[in-house]
Image: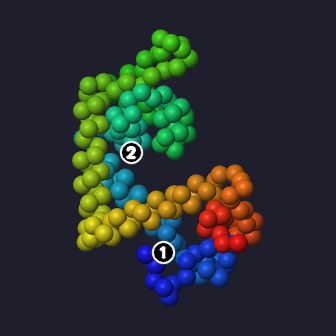
Amino acid sequence: MTNSDSPVVAPDDERTFYYKPNKYTPTESAGFLMRRVLSSILQQADAQLEVHGLTYVQWLPLYKLLLCADTTNAQLAKDLGMDPASVTRALDRIEAKGLLRRERSTADRRVVHLVLTDEGRRIAADVPQVLSRVLNCHLAGFSHEECRTLVAMLQRMIVNGDAMRSSPSDDTILKPDADCLVPSAMNPR
């Protein structure tokens, strides 16, 4: 959904760049604005989940464990994009609150499974209601179509970021001057 008069950003063509170093301002930066929105969402969610004594760092893994019951600390850290030490500290706090048990695997003693207690499952089940309420408040005035467009654009940005992190392969071109990895399907030769 692009305006025919509006260029499409091509990482290998500076003429199409939306952001220019000499005109860059944080108040117009998608990254800065996303960070501010995320910070607001987390503050509001934390405030509503405070009744359970949970913070974002605790309710996020708690909710993830509700969705994916059979997981380990390492897998949880990977799934949440958090470092393993932070996840361990969060899990220690969650366990101390009686919301989680760690159970050593009977098949492999090196593996520790994370299991929510009944109370942990009950509290984790509140997270989607809180997040839905907080997100809907942040989306006040948006049409459902605008919401779908926003989500689709954010998903595209994630795909682009994943492409930047992946190693170059035959179907990806690295443009050193643009600092971007461009999938060949996006780069007409």
Q: Position of residue 75 (x, y in %)?
A: 51, 33
Disc 2: CA contacts within 10 A as few (<14), some (14-19) or many (>=20):
some
Q: Are marks 2 and 1 in contact (CB under 8 Å)?
A: no
As rendered, which of 186 and 89 lies closer to the eye? 186
Residue 48 appears in the rendering: no
Which residue is nearer to you in this view: 131 or 172? 172
Q: Residue 63 occupies which quadrant of the picture? A: top left
145 left or right of 105? left
Residue 153 can be seen in this image: yes
Disc on res. 111: none
Q: In terms of image quadrants, where is residue 93?
A: top left
Indicate the position of residue 72 as horizontal and vertical percent values: 48, 28
Q: Which residue is drawn at 45% across and 65% down?
A: 153
Say which residue appears at 42% left-offset and 21% top-offset: 102
Q: Nearer the viewer, residue 166 or 85?
A: 166
**Which one is earlier in the sequence, the residue at label 2 or at label 1?**
1
Q: What residue type is labelled 1?
A: Thr
Task: Give the residue at mark 1.
Answer: 27
Q: Position of residue 154 (x, y in %)?
A: 45, 62
Q: In this view, does 46 lie above or below 35?
A: above
What kind of element bears circle 2?
A: helix
Residue bearing the label numbered 2: 56
Is residue 23 rendered to the left or right of residue 44? right
Image-quadrant location for residue 119? top left
Give x and y (percent) for residue 51: 24, 41
Furthest-top residue in this view? 106
> At 29% across and 51% down in the image, what residue appears?
131
